[in-house]
Amino acid sequence: MKILVINAGSSSLKYQLIDMENETLLAKGLCERIGLDGKFTYKPLVEGKSKIDAVDVAMPTHAEAIQAVLNALIDPANGVVASMDEIDAVGHRVLHGGKAFTKSCLVDDACIAAIKKCIPLGPLHNPANLMGIDACTKCMPGKPQVAVFDTAFHMTMPPKAYTYAIPYEYYENDDVRRYGFHGTSHRYVSARCVELLGNPEHSKVICCHLGNGSSLSACVDGQCVDTTMGLGPLAGVPMGTRCGDIDGTIIEYLMGKHGYDIKEMMNILNKKSGVLGISGVSSDFRDLEAAASQGNERAQLALDKFNYEVRKDIGAYAAAMGGCDAIVFTAGVGENGADTRAHICEGLEYMGVKLDPAKNAQRADEHIISTDDSKVKVFVIATNEELMIARDTKAIAEAL
Ligand code: AMP
């Protein structure tokens, strides 16, 4: 069975074709500048096939983008399948499933209506995700499609974790609660971690998804019991450009002082804050590390703030779970930032975390970076959200 995985944004669309026989990636790529001057990238992972690198392809809408993907996949010279019939189903990443979705679901009229209902909760992403679904329906009529939600994994959180301390009617009437994001990544790495721990009957795992966007989750026996992002992806630890947790008073104060409207204020918190905001240098951790090593104090402060907040949340989740068996680092910074991992774990010796500096400096998709006698095992596990989406899609498509 071959599954096409789609991650549609408002003007871009990432795709992967995965052969589920042995879970191998056949091709991947990206459509960028949809609705503008369309750029198409295609990378086949099959011997002897040539890639296409950011070439001009007219993509006025997502439908032309999907068509360009299909054309490349079935191209006689450089395609990886003979015809569209070989693509059995499509899995879509969907940001917000609200309270309605605790797991992935087949895309049908009811599912589309429910995703639409969640647009107020995910105003930037859900409409784009729907455009991806709609484009596939047009280009591949009748092909089973599955929606995999970023929020679904976190729906096992207990009320004390997801309830905000604001009047309860906002939860009852307006669905205001913690939802959490990066759920597919947290699900993948937490499950892999439990496997690497030897599938114990009971496990307490803290997952640190640290990338451009960052979030932590606390997972007991494979189920999420808390996570740092909230109603939207602005909450939690500081991120590349997002502020993470701040005092709501700041919003009122700055809007009053500078005369910002709410749109300007939210733009500052989403796009101009985080480590970019503190450093004034970059949202990219490699740039920050380079600047800090040259003596840039604000770049150093941005890194210190990030590491401090992640460390604090690890401590909080160990307290929330009554212990911790393992910590997992994943995503761009988590997988590659050895210094960041070392600084985050500094001072966690009291709870049984002992990093092995040599192991931490090594690179691998999956490896343990704690010492043999560390009570808490620390892993780096490369996330694979696309594979998780493909697995869910396969399971749902096979059951049809
Ligand atoms: P993601 O959003 O998961 O793609 O992660 C992007 C982030 O990973 C960027 O801030 C990058 O700077 C960071 N990153 C990638 N490679 C490295 C590296 N070798 N060291 C530190 N950070 C890295």
Image (tube, rainbow, N blue to C red):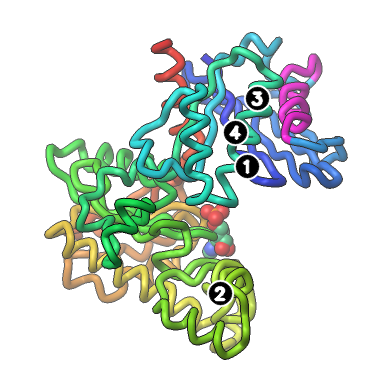
Q: Can you tell which mark lies on residue 128? A: 1
Nearer the observer: mark 4 or 3; the answer is 3
> Which numbered disc, 1 or 4, marks the residue that appears first in the sequence?
4
> Which numbered disc, 4 or 3, marks the residue that appears first in the sequence?
4
Q: Where is residue 143 drawn, in percent x and y?
A: 59, 15
What span is in magenta?
Answer: 62-77
User: What's the CA distance linking mark 2 and mark 3?
Assistant: 36 Å
User: What's the CA distance linking mark 4 and mark 2?
Assistant: 29 Å
User: What's the CA distance linking mark 4 and mark 3?
Assistant: 9 Å
Describe the element under mark 3 as helix, strand or loop.
helix
Q: Which residue is mark 3?
A: 136
Q: Say which amino acid is labelled 3.
A: Cys
Give the total number of marks visible in the rendering. 4
Measuring 82% from the left and 37% from the top, which residue is drawn there?
60
Q: In which of the image's four quarters is ligand 1 placed?
A: bottom right
Q: Say which amino acid is labelled 1.
A: Ala
Q: Is mark 1 within 8 Å of ligand 1?
A: no
In the image, residue 195 above or below residue 206: above
Q: Where is residue 136 drawn, in percent x and y?
A: 65, 25
Q: Which residue is mark 4?
A: 6
Are the residues flagged by discs 4 and 3 in contact, CB closer than 8 Å?
A: yes
Q: Decide: few, some or many residues near mark 4? Use Cα within 10 Å; few <14, some 14-19, many ≥20.
A: many
Q: Say which amino acid is labelled 4.
A: Ile
Nearer the observer: mark 2 or 1; the answer is 1
Which of the two residues, 397 or 286, is positioned nearer the viewer here?
397
User: What's the CA distance linking mark 2 and mark 1?
Assistant: 24 Å
Nearer the observer: mark 1 or 4; the answer is 1
In the image, residue 327 above or below residue 263: above
